[in-house]
Image: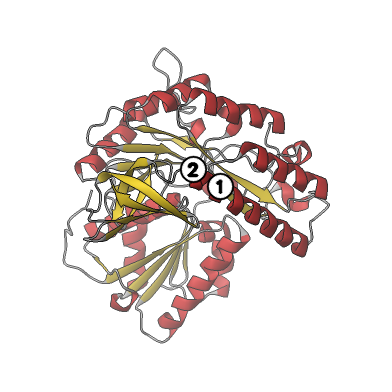
Amino acid sequence: MTPPASTPARASVHFRSLGCPKNRVDTEVMLGSLALSGYALAEKLDDADVVVINTCSFIESARQESIDAILEIAELRETGRLRALVVAGCLPQRYGGELAKELPEVDAFVGTSEFPRIAEILGAALGGRRGGVYVESGRTYLHGERDPRLLVGPTHSAYLKIAEGCDRICAFCAIPGIRGKFQSRTLESVIAEARQLAVAGVRELNLVAQDSTSWGKDLTGTGRGRPKLDALLRALDEVEGLDWIRLLYVYPSAVTDALIAALGSGRRVLPYVDIPLQHASDAMLRAMQRGTTADRQRKLVERLRSEIPDVTVRTTFIVGFPGETDADFEALCDFVREMRFDRVGVFRYSDEQGTAAQTLPGKVPVRVARARHRRILDLLRELQSEQLATLVGREVDVLVDAGGRDRAVARMRSQAPDIDGNVLLRGAAETGEVIRARITAVRGPDLDATRA
């Protein structure tokens, strides 16, 4: 998975990858392509001739983070410290032409369809072309197992993208307009890359897509109907060398009996369900165009817990959606108290260009949305502290993310990387190994532990 440089390095490139794990995979594929084309890869900004910023534009806060990063690096470009600055990903895919007018300091804007051309585009930028916009509307490149890919960070854990784009019509979401129509990788392609990653030393795979549960719907059948996500999970479960396989981004109305069975019976596939519910008021769910009700969501969570032993249920919610009343918000808080999810993320609503929600009446004042956001986060911290306290004294398996002679940072099976907290381990441990640990205390979202 780590391609050798085929030609002498022409320039050193530093990447700044923002946003979700799917962006991270795109970054790793671009890094692999550049390394294969002879570019040196600079871990530090100070060592770089060229900077590529892979951006996110999913919500307002993500757009602002991307713009801030561009402006910061643009100063270095203007002073001559850098030879080129390239902006890639969702932001140029959505606003490429506008950005080119507003940010003349940027040499190239690379949309989501043009990732395979990154070496060519960098060559043009270094050759003096400025302001190039490389965007194909409505399309995102979906990499395969033959594409070079250079993993970022510790190589014992990796994300595996199984599909790209989305065909759903959630009122608040701009992803279909940015990433385009849904497209699945074939089962053979996913399994081949999983095997490559395992051979390279990866022990944990986290499966990602904008809509994982739609995997296979666009693939040709084999006489027994189109392949489904449960079949992919069962095939991945057989890949030797892997320890943990975690499924992320499950759409609630698309959960099938077969998927639940696959999640509950795997050797390597973990009993972990990341299922964004978004709200618990029927009025809000209708306005969001989610195609479900609070009661159906309640029954789904109860079923997951009854049919999958030791399941971890992670979800996300949106507060401040247009029309959200105090009663709607209270219904959400009551639902959170009742269901006591293992992991929860909460976002404040922001208007997104081209979405149905952008034109809805009843916009919630920013101060009200912020107050609701703070209140539900306080509630969630209290509930999570109670949930984590039940683990104190127990022995669990943990995957070590950062080893050491006396201390280490690790995660339980119930903790996805970057979002679910860590296990702070006392005792010697090596990065990438799975060991037994005894939980000793709760430390905010994290847990203290000693090696068992």
Residue at figure coordinates x 76%, y 48% from the top left = 329
Q: Residue at x 30, y 75 (%)?
A: 48
Q: In front: 179, or 45?
A: 45
Badge 2 element: loop
Q: Residue furthest bottom?
A: 79
Residue 90 in sight here:
yes
Please indicate whether residue 99 sits to the left or right of residue 172 in the image: left
The x and y percentages for residue 156 are 27, 48
Q: Amino acid at mark 1?
A: Glu
Q: Residue at x 57, y 28 (%)?
A: 254
Compared across the picture, whether 330 is left or right of 432 comes to right
Residue 433 is tagged as none
Q: Is residue 335 left or right of residue 397?
A: right
State which quadrant residue 191 falls in: top left
Q: Are marks 2 and 1 in contact (CB under 8 Å)?
A: yes
- In this orientation, does residue 350 appear? no
| Figure check: 59 above or below 49 | above
Place of residue 83 in the rendered image (x, y in percent of width and height, measured from the top left): 34, 78
Using a 10 Å C-alpha cutoff, classify the residue at mark 1 as few (fewer than 14 neighbours), some (14 to 19) or many (20 or more): few
Q: CA distance from mark 2 to mark 1?
A: 7 Å
Q: Residues within 10 Å of mark 2 (few under 14, many from 20)?
A: few
Q: Which residue is mark 1?
A: 386
- Residue located beneath label 2 in the image: 390
- Expressed as whole percent of the image width and height from the top left, the position of residue 438 reads 34, 46
| Residue type at numbered disc 2 | Thr
Is the residue 368 above or below the residue 75 in the image?
above
